[in-house]
Image: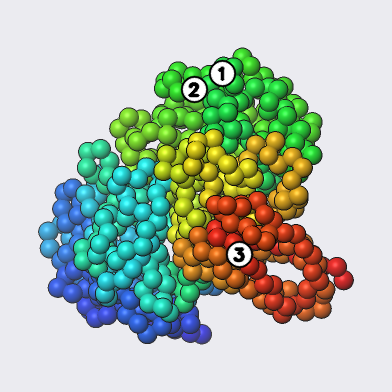
Amino acid sequence: MIRLFLLFLTFVFCGHVSAANVLMKSPDGHLVVTFQVSKGIPYYRVSWQKEEVLQPSQMGFLLADGDLDKDFKVIGIKRNTHDEMWHELYGEEDSVHNHYNEATIMLQQTRGLKRKLNIVFRVFNDGVGFRYVIPEQAGLGKIAIKEEQTQFALSHDVPAWSISLNHVEYYEGLYKKSLISEKDTVCTPLTIEYSPKIYMAIHEAALEDYATLNLTPRGHKLVAALTPWSDGMKVYGEKTIKSPWRTIIFASTASGLITNRTMLNLNEPCKLADTSWIEPGRYIGIWWCIHQKKNTWEMGPIHGATTENVKRYIDFAAKHGFSGVLSEGWNPGWGQGEKVTYLKSYPDFDIEEVNRYARQKGVRWIGHMESWGQGKLIEKEMDQAFSWFHGMGMNAVKTGYVGHLMDGKELPSSQYGVRHYRKVVECAARHHIMIDNHEPAMPTGIQRTYPNLMTQEGVRGQEYNAWDPRGGNPPAHTVTIPFTRCLAGPIDFTPAIFKLQGAIKGTHPHSTLAKQLAEFVVLYSPLQMAADAIENYEGQPALTFIESCPTTWSKTIVPNGEIGKYITVCRKERGGDRWFIGTMTNADKRTMDVCLDFLDADKTYRAMIYEDGAGADYESNPYAMNFRQVEVKRGDNLHFELARSGGAVVRIEAIK
Ligand code: CA
C-alpha cells in the first residue's frame, strides 16, 4: 500500500518539482540523505544516527564543452523500494540482504544548452550509494568529462586511514592515520574514524567504464579526483555516461565496516549463465622461492618453473589438499617487453605434460600472464591463450601489470586501464578461466557480476617481506588492511609463510607463526595462497590447520577490532558446521577473548586451537606455538594470550 502511494506521488510531482529539499531515508530511518538545488547548484548531505556527517556537498561535472554543475532545476523524481536476499556464489556470506530506498532525481539546466543530468540515490540502513547518469539527449554525442565535481564535505576535520595516490605504485602502500586536512590526494577506500561511535568509509562500486575515484582534501572537505587519461581528460563516452556508485558506509565500530555489503549490493547481479566451473580453493606455488631469489623467473640454472619442480609442487598439493599450483616464469620473453608470449612455454617447462600430470592428481596448474603493463599484448593473445589453457584442463590464471603506465601511456586506474581489465575478465569467463589480477585498478565489487574475477592484489602484500630493503611490512600492517583495503574486496595477500627468516638480512615476515595462520582466515580471498616453499611446510603440525581451512564462507562475524591494533574474525564454512577463527595483534602483546555466542545451542563442539606458545615473540621467538583442544558450547569464552605481532586460529567442529 505504502509503495503504491509513493509511486502515485512520483507521478504527481513529475515536471512540477520546486527547489525544495528531496528527503531520502533508509528503510530503518536512521540514515537520511537530503538533496537540494540551491541557486542552481545540486548538493546532497548525509546524516546517520542523527549526526550530520556530510554537510551540503556539491555534485555535477565539467564537460569539455560546457558546465554540468550549475543552472539546474529539478524536473522529476522517481522513487522505488527494493528488498531482496541474494545468494553469493562464494564469499563471506551465503546470502546478502539488499534493502534500500531509491530516488532518481532528474535535473535540467535552465540556461544555455539546457542539458539534463540524472542522479540516482540508494539509501541502505548502513550505507548510501549515488551515481550520475548523463542521459541521451539532443546535442550530446561524444561526451568528455573534464572533471567530476563530487564533494564529500565532512562536518569537521576527522582522522582517517589512507594511502596516498602519488608516490605509491599499484596501491602497495602502508595505510597511515592522519587528519583529512593533512592528507595529499588519497585512494579509496578511505576509512574514517568520525567519532568513537561512528566509523565510515568512502569508496565506489561497479567501476565498469569510467576512471577510478581518488579524493583530494580541501580543508576537511574531500573532492573527487578521477585518474586522468594522458590527455588530461577524465572520462569519455558516447551519448550517455553512467558513473560508478559513490559509496559512503557507516558502522558504530570499525569492525562493523568489514561486514558492510553496500558495495556488493550496488553491483549488477551475476552475468554468467553457467558458473559451475568457478571453484574457490587453496593454492601453493614457487612464488616465494622466486621472491627470495632462490629460483629465477627466467630460464637458467635455478629456474623455478621447470617441469620437474612444478611436478614436485603438484605432488605436494595432491597430498595436502590444495586445489592449485601456480608457477610464474613459465613462458618465454620474461622481462623482455614485447618478446613475451603466452602461446608457448619455455623449453624446460612441458606445459602439456604438467597439466596432464596435475589433472591426473586432481590438481590444476595455475598459469601466469605477466605483461609489464602491456595491456595490448594480453588483449592480442588472450583469446587464443585462454582457449589453449582451458583445453589443457586449467581453470585459473594470474595476470600482472608491473610498470607505471599501461601500454606506455595510460595509468592503470584510468578509464583506459579499467576498460582493459574488464575485457580480460569477460574473455576469461568465455573460456571458463578464473582470474587473480595483480597490479589492478582498485576493486569495486565487480566479482558479483563476473564471479570469475576471484581475487586481486592492489595491496602491499607478503612479497615485501621477501625483498623490501626497509625490512618488510610492519606488524601493524595486517591488522590495518582488514579495515581499509579489504573493504574493496578479496585480496591476494599470500599469507602463511612458515619459515620466518628472510633471504635478505633484516627482511622477513614480522610476525609469529601463529599470526601467519591467522592471516589465512582474516584476509579473505576465495583463491587463497599458502605462500611458502613446500619444503617449509613439510612435517609442520601448523599445516594441518591450512589443510582444513576453507576459502568461502556461509557467515562472517568480526567480534573484536581496532584499526592498526588487533582483529578477530569468525567464519562458518559453507555446506558444513565448522567454524574457523583467526585473531591477531600488532607489535603489542595483548589478551583477546572471543565469546562463542554464534554456535548452535543444542550442540557440543571440539575447538582445536593453534596459538602463540610460551615466550613467543615476533622478534626473538616467532615459532613458539601451542596446540590445545577443548570442548566448548554456545556462550563459552575462548581466551588467548597473543604475543607481540602474534595470533591464534581455532577450528571448531560439532562432536555431538
Ligand atoms: Ca605486487
Precedes in sequence: disc 3 or disc 2:
2
Residue 401, x across and y down, in percent: 44, 35
User: Is 257 located above or below residue 435 in the figure?
Assistant: below
Question: Which residue corresponds to the image point at 58% horizontal and 56% vertical from the top-left?
Answer: 617
Is there a contact, CB below 8 Å, between mark 3 and mark 2?
no
Amino acid at pointer 1: Met
Residue 307, x across and y down, in percent: 68, 22
Q: Which residue is mark 2?
A: 334
Residue 122, x across and y down, in percent: 42, 69
Numbered-mark total: 3
Q: Secondary structure at mark 1?
A: loop
Residue 71, x across and y down, in percent: 15, 66
Category of crowding for the residue at label 1, using alpha-carbon neighbours closer than 10 angstroms: few (below 14), some (14–19), many (at least 20): many
Q: Quadrant of the rendered structure where residue 79 is? A: bottom left
Q: Is residue 148 left or right of residue 534?
A: left
Q: Is ligand 1 closer than 8 angstroms to the Cβ of mark 1?
A: no
Precedes in sequence: disc 3 or disc 1:
1
Q: Which residue is mark 3?
A: 642
Question: Which residue corresponds to the image point at 66% horizontal and 42% vertical from the top-left?
Answer: 283
User: Is 294 located above or below residue 218 in the figure?
Assistant: above
Question: Which residue corresponds to the image point at 57% horizontal and 17% vertical from the top-left?
Answer: 300
Q: Is residue 96 left or right of residue 379?
A: right
Give the distance between the C-alpha atoms of the residues marked 3 and 1, in whole angstroms. Answer: 43 Å
Q: Quadrant of the rendered structure where residue 159 is? A: bottom left
Amino acid at pointer 2: Trp
Q: Quadrant of the rendered structure where residue 656 is? A: bottom right
The label shown at residue 299 is: 1
Precedes in sequence: disc 2 or disc 1:
1
Is there a contact, CB below 8 Å, between mark 2 and mark 1?
yes
User: Outermost residue, left direction?
Assistant: 112
